[in-house]
Image (tube, rainbow, N blue to C red):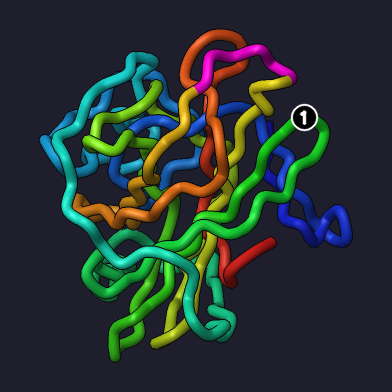
Amino acid sequence: MVYTPRSARRGALFAGSVAVLGLLTACGTGQTVHSSSPITSSGTAAPATGDSSAPAPSDTATTSSPVSSAPTGAPSTAPTRATATSGGGTTAAASTRCHTSELRASVGRNDPGAGQENFPVVLTNTSGRTCTVRGFPGAAFVNASGGQLGPNPGRESGSSTTVTLKPGQSAWAGLTFSNPGVSGAKTAKPAALLITPPDERDHLKVTWTGGEVPVSGNSSAVFLTVFSPGTAP
């Protein structure tokens, strides 16, 4: 399924397909869903390059060690819109990449439709310099003890662009899954969502207020899209 911005329902709508639940590092340039298991590192996201040979989410739930708290919640003021460019390969992106310590994570409001739940995952540049994000975030639902709930997320196909973030600017990626009430999947209520910026290992922790999420059974997959400029579709 493809996650389409809200502007295509007014312009674009999340169109997703299915459930988040894996802890992986964001991919810088990947555009397809992968199937092999990622390398794991206790308490951090697993590395992923995002190209066609990169490791990707497995279908088995894993348990991560408890994590420390990190900046959470939506920005107190609306950040200005970032810009995106289709150029800027991995070398250029790496030189100006936004690091986890320079970002704040938040999850926007749900935009449900056609049996799907669609949330924007937002990263805001809180540093004093301009930096970039490119590709997929890493994400995992966790319980109050920090244990991961459900399998790793898949990745929707799509073209990655380098999103340039000046101080205060944001980028968003789509997180989508089938409504458990429709799919009949087994559910759990996460305490938090861990979000890892592209090409980083350290994650940010956001309190999850989106209710029950599917963790196994019918249509329990969660999918992520690449980052786009702004805070919501």
Count the marks.
Answer: 1
Q: Is residue 135 left or right of 17 when viewed as pictured?
A: left
Residue 215 % position (x, y): 47, 20
Residue 176 image position (x, y, % from top left): 60, 38
Horizontal and vertical percent position of residue 122: 49, 62
Kindly state the secondary structure of the residue where label 1 is placed: loop
Q: Nearer the viewer, residue 30 or 138?
A: 138
Residue 98 image-quadrant placement: bottom left
84 is higher (above) or lower (below) than 205: below
On screen, residue 154 above or below 232: above
| Range of magenta residues | 182-187
Residue 41 lies in quadrant: top left
Residue at (38, 27) in percent of width and height: 152
Displayed quadrant of residue 7: bottom right
Residue at x 17%, y 53% (from the top left corner)? 68
Whether residue 183 appears in magenta in the rendering, the answer is: yes
- 124 or 179: nearer the viewer: 179
Q: Which residue is the extreme one toward the left?
A: 42
Check the picture and name the quadrant holding the C terminus: bottom right
Residue 207 is a magenta residue: no
Q: Position of residue 39 (x, y in %)?
A: 18, 29
Instruction: Give the residue pinned by disc 1.
Output: 115
**149 lies left or right of 17:** left
Residue pushed farthest right? 10
Left or right of residue 72, residue 215 in this image: right
Q: Is residue 54 above or below residue 131?
A: above
Q: Residues within 10 Å of mark 1 (few under 14, many from 20)?
A: some
Q: From what the image shows, is residue 207 above or below residue 153?
A: below
Quarter in which the N terminus is drawn = top right
The amino acid type of the residue labelled 1 equals Gly
- What residue sits 67% from the left and 38% below the top? 117
